[in-house]
Image (cartoon, helix red, strand yellow):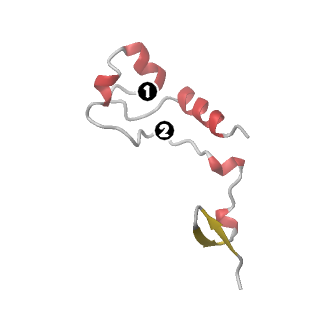
Amino acid sequence: MQERIQHFGIWIKKSEKNKINRENYAVINKCNSVWSPSTPARYSDPQERKKYFEDNECTLYCDSYCEELQEKCLIN
């Protein structure tokens, strides 16, 4: 019988695939998952927009912002 673990109230089979570690916990995804048509208007200042996004449509986060967020996520 395979061992099961509880993750946020859900029982899942324990396996190599669901081991959470530092390398796979906060994987960078540059896509803006909360984008809406009003997002570009909220970042109308070009300097502010460049701080967070690498495109004018505000659909892709810039590398430096992603790395900053990842670093905060990985603080023990």
> SS class of the residue under badge 1?
loop
* In the image, farthest residue toward the left: 37
Q: Position of residue 74 (x, y in %)?
A: 68, 40
Residue linked to disc 2: 30
Q: Position of residue 72 (x, y in %)?
A: 64, 34
Question: What is the three-letter code of the residue carrying label 1?
Answer: Glu
Q: Say above or below: 63 vs 12.
A: above
At x 60%, y 32%, the residue is 67
* In the image, farthest residue toward the front: 9
Labels 1 & 2 near each other (Cβ < 8 A) = yes
Q: Residues within 10 Å of mark 2 (few under 14, many from 20)?
A: some
At x 34%, y 25%, the residue is 56
At x 55%, y 33%, the residue is 66
Q: Say above or below: 16 vs 37.
A: below
The answer to whether residue 37 is left or right of residue 70 is left
Residue linked to disc 1: 54
The answer to whether residue 4 is left or right of residue 59 is right
- Residue situated in front as seen by the camera: 6 or 47: 6
Task: Identify the image quadrant of the N terminus.
Answer: bottom right
> SS class of the residue under badge 2?
loop
The quadrant holding residue 33 is top left
The quadrant holding residue 70 is top right
Question: What is the three-letter code of the residue carrying label 2?
Answer: Lys
* Whole-number angstrom distance, CA of label 1 to CA of label 2: 9 Å
Tell which circle, 1 or 2, labels the residue nearer the N-terminal end: 2
